[in-house]
Image (cartoon, rainbow, N blue to C red):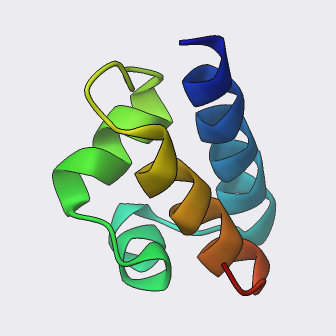
Amino acid sequence: MAQAQTLAGWITIIAEDRGLDERTLAATTDLDIEDVRAILGGVVLMIPLSVLDQALCRLEGRRH
């Protein structure tokens, strides 16, 4: 659970730093809008770590 919270925290920080809204973040990370809302709200219990890791990689522009 701590890993999921950490990944979600990084995604949130980067999104805020870049001024990304929910829809732009969803498009950038290829996530569903509901998953983006969960991440931004810190409720990531049901999101697999692999999904969060892939989203962070996309957001950072890294290959996964």
Dividing the picture into quadrants, the one containing residue 23 is: bottom left
Q: 35 left or right of 10?
A: left
Q: Can you name the residue that lies furthest to the top here?
A: 1
Given residues 43 and 4, the one toward you in this image is: 4
Name the residue rendered at 56%, 28% in the picture: 4
- Residue 60 screen position, x and y as percent: 77, 75
Name the residue rendered at 59%, 37% in the picture: 8
**Quadrant in which the C terminus is drawn:** bottom right
- State the count of labels: 0
Name the residue rendered at 72%, 87% in the picture: 63
- Residue 46 screen position, x and y as percent: 25, 26
Q: 4 left or right of 48?
A: right
Q: 19 left or right of 49?
A: right
Name the residue rendered at 81%, 59% in the picture: 17
- Residue 35 screen position, x and y as percent: 27, 48
Given residues 64 and 5, the one toward you in this image is: 64
Question: Is the residue 45 above or below the residue 8 in the image?
Answer: above
